[in-house]
């Protein structure tokens, strides 16, 4: 879904709708001609990959299995809720150059985040202890 949304924003920002009219369609259902679509959209796919590759990431060590009740889920949900500007006075507003401003998704544009899950939620303060523990257990690269 992240690739889809980044691609949509690139299309919107650079007014490439005529060049990539089927971008949304390839993500909405199983497309039997997927390889043909990918060939036609190769340049956009490269732009999307480049954009994603250049994003900063924070990897933290959490030694539990993924599940809805895992520490991973708790950390993800609360970090998104904490960092989201959606429906709030922005604390860390994205600059005018941020690609997400061209997104079709109101949640992306207003939250300042590409992941729209949990952007409308409030974070639980206790998660900060979990984050601190995870950071302490993470070996810097």
Image: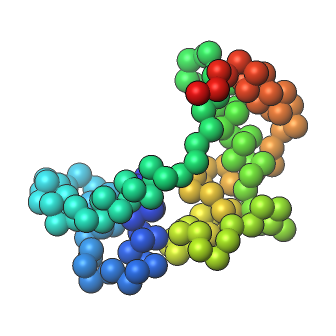
Q: Residue furthest front?
A: 141
Residue occupying image coordinates x 76% and y 21%: 136
Q: Position of residue 11 (x, y in %)?
A: 38, 75
Residue occupying image coordinates x 67% and y 22%: 138
Q: Quadrant of the C terminus?
A: top right
* Image side of residue 87 versus residue 95, left or right: right
User: Which sits in the foreground, 41 or 120?
Assistant: 41
* Image side of residue 12 versus residue 71, left or right: left
Residue occupying image coordinates x 64% and y 26%: 140
Picture layout, residue 76 above or below residue 113: above
Picture layout, residue 23 above or below residue 17: above
Residue occupying image coordinates x 73% and y 26%: 135
Residue 50 in sight here: yes
Picture layout, residue 57 above or below residue 22: above
Q: Position of residue 82 (x, y in %)?
A: 78, 48
Disc tally is 0
Is the image coloured rainbow, by chain, by secondary structure, or in one colour? rainbow
């Amino acid at each position: 879904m992240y690739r889809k949304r980044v691609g949509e924003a690139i299309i919107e920002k650079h007014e490439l709708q005529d060049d990539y009219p089927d971008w949304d369609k390839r993500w909405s259902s199983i497309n039997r001609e997927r390889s043909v679509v990918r060939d036609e959209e190769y340049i956009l796919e490269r732009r999307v990959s480049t954009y994603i590759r250049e994003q900063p990431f924070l990897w933290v060590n959490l030694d539990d299995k993924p599940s809805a009740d895992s520490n991973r889920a708790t950390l993800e949900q609360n970090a998104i809720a904490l960092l989201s500007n959606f429906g709030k006075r922005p604390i860390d507003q994205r600059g005018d150059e941020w690609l997400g401003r061209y997104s079709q998704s109101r949640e992306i544009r207003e939250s300042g985040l590409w992941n729209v899950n949990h952007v409308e939620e409030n974070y639980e303060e206790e998660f900060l202890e979990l984050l601190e523990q995870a950071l302490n257990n993470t070996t810097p690269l």
